[in-house]
Structure formats: C-alpha cells, structure tokens
Image: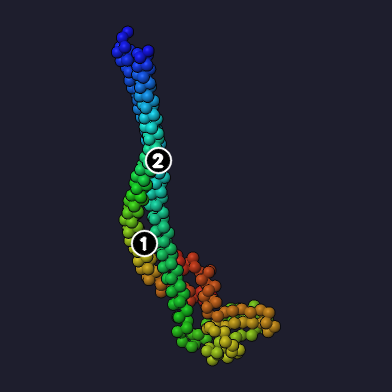
Amino acid sequence: MGLEELESRIMEDADKQIQKIEEESNKKIKEIREEIEEDANQEAEKILRKGRQEANLTYRRIIADIIIKGKHRIEKRKNSIIEDAFGRARNNILESSDPEKKKFLEKLIDMDGDEVHEPQIMVDPKYANLVKEAKTVDIGDFGVVIQSSDGKMRIDNTLNNKINRLKTTLRAEISSMLFG
Amino acid sequence: MNQIEHIKNIEEKAEKKIDKARRDAKEKIKAAEMEREKLIQVKTEDAEKKVKQMIANEEKKAGKEVESLNRSIEEEIRSVTMKADSEMRRTVKLINKKLME
C-alpha cells in the first residue's frame, strides 16, 4: 500500500467516523426535540383542560348568580307588598273614626283583660279620650297595654305589636292570597 | 522515518477532526436541550391566551343569557305586583279582621 493510499484511507475512516457522530447526534437531537415537543404539548393541554373547566364554571357561576339575585329581587318585592298590606291595615285603623277606634280598643282590652289579675289598662295620651277607665301612659302607639296590679304580668296590645305577631302567624296565608 | 512522521501527522489531523465533530455534536445536543424551557414557555403562553379567550367567550355567552334571565325576572316581578294589586283590598280586610280577633 502506497503512502498516498494510506493517507487517503486514514482520512476516509475519519470522515466515516465523523459522519457516524453527526448521524448519531442528529438522531439524538431529533429525539430530544420530539420529547420537548411532547412535554410542551402535555403542559399546554393541562392548561387548556383546566381552562375549559374554568370557562365552564365561569358561565355557570354567572348564571347561578343572576338566578339567585333574581329570586332575591322577587322575594324582596313580595316582602315589600306584604309589608304594604300590613301598613294599609294599620292605616285603616288609625284613620278610622273615633267610635271605631274606641270599639277596637275595647276589643283589645276584652281580648286579654281576663288573663291578668286586677288589670290596669294603659293607653297613650293621644287616645286617652277613647277609653275612660285607662291610665294614660306614653306607650308610643295606638292600642293598649294591660298590666297586673303587681306589675308581674304585662300584655302589650299596641297596634305595632299586634301587627308584628300577625306578620308571623298570618304570613303564609297572606302570601298565598296575594301571590297565589 | 519521514513517512512514518507523515502518517502520524495525518492520523493526528484525522483525530482532531473527529474530536471537533464530537465537540460540535455535544454542543448541538446541549443547544437542543436548552430549547426545552423556551418551547414550553411558548406553548404555555399560547395555551393561556386560548384559556383567556375561552373564558371571555363564556362570559359573553352568559351575558346574553343574563339579559334574557333579567327580562324574565322583570316579567315575574310585574306579574307578582299585578296579582297582588288585585288581591290587596281582600288581604287588607283579612288583616284588619284578624287584628280584631
């Protein structure tokens, strides 16, 4: 084998090795890129999956919120109408004639007077002329307060108090009448 | 002797070329590994943009539904008020009757 041939063989072998190194590195790079691509896609898919759920929840949250607010608004309106009905009933009494008011006060006394031992009837100064036997005390409302002589028992039959009691007991019936 | 030297030189030269090719390959692999963070960041940012858009779309869709629901609620309130108006007199009468009982 001549010198030139030997020289050429050495360089050819080297080129072959270099080519092999390049092929292997290219293969490795390709694998790395594919792996990175897959990892990145997985990461992105994770975000998208979570995002889809969040978007869906956002929609449902907005709708649920508006339904709840709507129900509250309807309920508030109903409550205001019920309050109005009680207010009108109260005004009916307060705007009635003196004989009618007197009749009402007497009814309030009769209603619970027997429940109390030696009852003392108290009425507001504004309505003192309507119940002669009553003691005039600032009770701040139309109606009567019935109190036993020893002060141990006291029944508050003022109009506000009576209405407040009715608001509890009569609410369902009133609601059914007004709103069906 | 000169020929042996010459061949040695050629072999060294070939070895250097191979070493360089190895170093280059190593560098290229390292560079490919370095692309990981960048690519994940790009894909992640792209996905986040898509998510923002999805949420905005759902909000828009819900907005239309909200308008319709609000109209139904207004209608319900009107209907409740009308029904109550027609029954108010009877109701007040009942309350007054109950107050006397």
Looking at the rendered structure, the secondary structure element under dot 2 is helix
In the orientation shown, which residue stands out farthest toward the front? B1
The residue lying toward the viewer, choosing from B1 and A178, is B1
Which callout, 2 or 1, points to the residue nearer the camera? 2
Tag 1 subunit: B
Q: CA distance from mark 2 to mark 1?
A: 52 Å
Q: Secondary structure at mark 1?
A: helix
Residue topped by disc 1 = B73
Quadrant where the N terminus of chain B sits is: top left
Q: Residue at x 34, y 52 (%)?
A: B56
Task: Give neighbour class at mark 2: few <14, some 14-19, many 20+ (Cα, 10 Å).
Answer: few
A155, above or below A175, in the image: below
Instruction: Please report whichever mark, 2 or 1, sits nearer to the chain's N-terminal start.
Output: 2
Up-down relation of residue A54 to residue A104 (above or below): above
The spot of residue B84 in percent (x, y) is 39, 69
What residue do we see at 37% from left, 27% from top?
B20
Which image quadrant is residue B90 in? bottom left
Residue in front for this viewpoint, B92 or A81: A81
Q: Residue visible at 51% across and 71% down?
A: A167
Residue B26 vertical position relative to residue B76 in the rendered view, above or below: above
List x then y, in percent, for residue B41: 38, 43
The crowd level at tag 1 (other Cα within 10 Å; few <14, some 14-19, many 20+) is: some
Q: How many marks?
A: 2
Determine which residue is flagged by label 2: B37
Tell me the amino acid under the disc marked 1: Ile
Q: Are marks 2 and 1 on the same chain?
A: yes
Quarter occupied by residue A135: bottom right
Looking at this rendering, what residue extends furthest in the right direction? A150
Question: What chain does mark 2 sit on?
Answer: B
Determine the image quadrant of residue A31: top left
User: Where's residue A5, x and y in %?
Assistant: 30, 12
User: For the residue marked with disc 2, what is the amino acid?
Assistant: Glu
